[in-house]
Amino acid sequence: MNRSAPPFKDVLTLLGQLNYTWTNTESLLIHLIAGLAVVDKETATIIFLTLNTTRARVDLVERLAKMARMPAPVRKDVLDVTRKMMAEAKLRNKYNHCIYSFDDTGDNVSTLLMRVSESGDQLRYGKMDAIDADEIANITRSINRLAETNREIWALARRHGFPL
């Protein structure tokens, strides 16, 4: 069911919350790097900041977790949280890599995806999606799932004695 969209300023506020929640949760990978690589938090921070993308950071954490010396419970806990985190990445990336369109009243907000896709001998670009009440609910659920993942990362860091 498509319901009307909230004003653009409300959409921006919600997207700011999505980005804040994502960034805050991604930064917790520092604790996982420290614990898995058996280094101090400062060293883990340098490693984290040296890697330029979320994908690279998550790949590192997952590879460290998959090392033969890693106990199975640690491996499972780490892979569970990275999987949950990356499940939210598509939505976060969509809203970070698009142009926003709205009418002169600030209503009828939509996204214009800035990606080119090729299909046979044709190009497609500029896919538009409305940001209606259903999409706002989807974004809100993603924020809530990220906040839960954040709590899970803190809990596993404590449980496994990783540097806090």
Image (cartoon, rainbow, N blue to C red):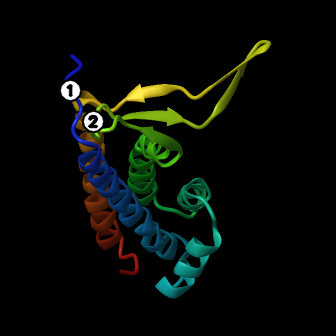
Tell which circle, 2 or 1, labels the residue nearer the N-terminal end. 1
Residue 154's spot in the image, x, y percent? 30, 67
- Asked whether the beta carbons under mark 2 and mark 1 sit within 8 Å of each other, the answer is yes
Q: Is 132 or 42 nearer to us in this picture?
A: 132
Secondary structure beneath disc 1? loop
Residue 147's spot in the image, x, y percent? 26, 56
9 left or right of 60 in image: left
Calculate the distance from the C-alpha at mark 2 to the C-alpha at mark 1: 9 Å
Q: Residue furthest top?
A: 120
Q: Which residue is mark 1?
A: 4
Above or below, 125 against 16 in this view is above
Residue 146's spot in the image, x, y percent? 31, 52
Q: Is 127 or 109 nearer to us in this picture?
A: 109
Quadrant position of the C terminus in the picture: bottom left
| Residue 13 falls in image quadrant | bottom left
Residue drawn at x 41%, y 50% as measured from the top left:
85
Residue drawn at x 36%, y 66% as measured from the top left:
24
Secondary structure beneath disc 2? loop
Q: Which residue is mark 2?
A: 107
Q: Is 123 or 43 nearer to us in this picture?
A: 123
In the rendered image, is residue 125 in sight? Answer: yes
Quadrant position of the N terminus in the picture: top left
